[in-house]
Image (cartoon, rainbow, N blue to C red):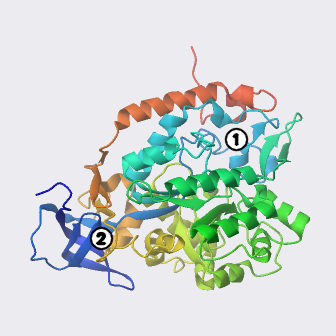
Amino acid sequence: MPESTPLTTLIKGGWIVAFDGERHRILRDGVVVYRGDTVTHVGKSYEGPVDHTIDARAQLVSPGLVNAHVHVGAHTGDRMIFDAGRADLFRSGFMNYCASKGINGPTLHDFEDADVAIRYSLSCLLRFGSTTIVEMGGELGGESGNGELGPLASHAGELGIRIYMAPGMRSAHHYYDQDGRHQIHWHADDGLATLDRALAFVERYDGAYEGRVRAILVPLEYHLSSHELLRRTKSAARQYGIGITLHLAESVLEFQDSIRHTGRTPVGMLHDLDFLGPEVVLGHGLYTSGHSQVAYTRGDDLALLAGTGTSVAHSPTVFARRGVYLESFQRYLDAGVNLAIGTDSYPQDMLGELKTVALMGKIADRDFEAVNTRDVFNAATLGGARALGRDDLGRLAPGAKADILIVDFQRARVGPFLDPIKALIQCCDGEVIDTVIVAGRTRVEEGRVLMWDSEELLEGVRRSCANAWDRFADYWPDNEPIDAVFPGAFESWEE
Ligand SMILES: [Zn+2]
């Protein structure tokens, strides 16, 4: 048989999350068959010839999860801020470490080894169930200005994960001034050079690695984007037929600046700019009109999102760490907003994130019937696929991509269960995933990423972060030591 002939694989599953053309159903003791990178059959049995069989009769077979909001990296900063940080940022976490020291100074990330951080993060994403990710345009690893394929795309391509990305764009950046106050510095060119750089990437690399690397335009933040940059981004996305994602309504400061400078909420301003639409994925979209922390009730932001078909990528864990939550998952859903799920920073555990989605959603509404398990699973699969305009992801059905998770249901933590999806979300995290298949190729087996040495990556990324934390005092406004600003749970015992 010539090597180029695609092989046929059959998975015998105990519980298969099968898509019937409209919705997910649970298929007990069935089969999933894929040929090359595409699913060809889902049903009770299969009589045709197969080259390979995977016995998953005691396991759950699920479509791979679509992670709609990710910052690939080690997250040196996020790992500091639990229980601590600046009070003047109104609970925002990322501004504690993303702002540069002075207009041209370093950020905390500048002290890291970007290459190992990228590979560590990508391997966690894949290992814990994300088969498709949307990267939020991070500069980590420095996508080259001349349109070269940067380390992020090439590592993702080599690992086998699907990635939507492009170098991030911005008209401004956050910095701490000499008095240690947060400021925003607007760039002379309005950030238009960053759009040129992103489009060079789009032209050269959209569809690279057998279509697993796809382009999406990423104005990093609404807060840092001029209206001109947003207008040009929208028109470029239309011209190239690609999507857009950006952080929006993610901090109280951003919401207040938007009202004070434009008289419009962040969502309302994007609507006025004719920017919203089905190709747009808003990262977080948390502070909308009526949110209890913004003291602003005018307008109906959710109606604007739903009416334009705009998606929201919801990442509750990072906000829960700051005492903040979406108000609410159920309210957005009821308004008709397409919801997707993302892990944002750490841990990059998409399966684990789903429990937080479910619990925070119930707490937000103080209603045990809010946020049905079905809606959580749908958001992590069909919702993410819809956000990316893909009807071949997030489902197991003939014609869909063979992106598949096999979850080990023989674990004590799974226990007895009445419903496998409730067990998956309430009892599990990404550690229970045994096998991850992307585009018909097995990339994780028996819980191990096949491409890279995970122990080596862990050692490397710990060394990289330790270096950044050692340099913390050089970065922080008053050169305070890290232990004073972000103290550990207990004092160290030095003899
Ligand atoms: Zn983010």
| Cβ of mark 2 under 8 A from ligand 1 | no
Q: Which residue is mark 2?
A: 417
N-term-proximal mark, 1 vs 2: 1
* The one of 134 and 297 positioned closer to us in this rendering: 134
Identify the image quadrant of the N terminus.
Answer: bottom left
In the picture, measured across the screen, residue 152 lies left or right of residue 169, that is left
Residue at 81 percent of width and 29 percent of height = 478
Quarter of the figure with residue 326: bottom right
Residue type at mark 2 is Phe
The numbered dot on residue 72 is none
Does 157 sit above or below residue 264? above
Crowding near pointer 1: few (<14 within 10 Å), some, many (20+)? many
Quarter of the figure with residue 303: bottom right
Residue at 43 percent of width and 70 percent of height = 381
Q: Secondary structure at mark 2?
A: loop
Q: Please state the horizontal and vertical placement of residue 296, each as a whole percent of the image.
A: 83, 73
The picture quadrant for ligand 1 comes to: bottom right
In the picture, measured across the screen, residue 413 lies left or right of residue 1, that is right
Q: Which residue is mark 1?
A: 97
Q: Please state the horizontal and vertical placement of residue 348, each as a whole percent of the image.
A: 48, 51
Q: Secondary structure at mark 1?
A: loop
Residue type at mark 1 is Tyr
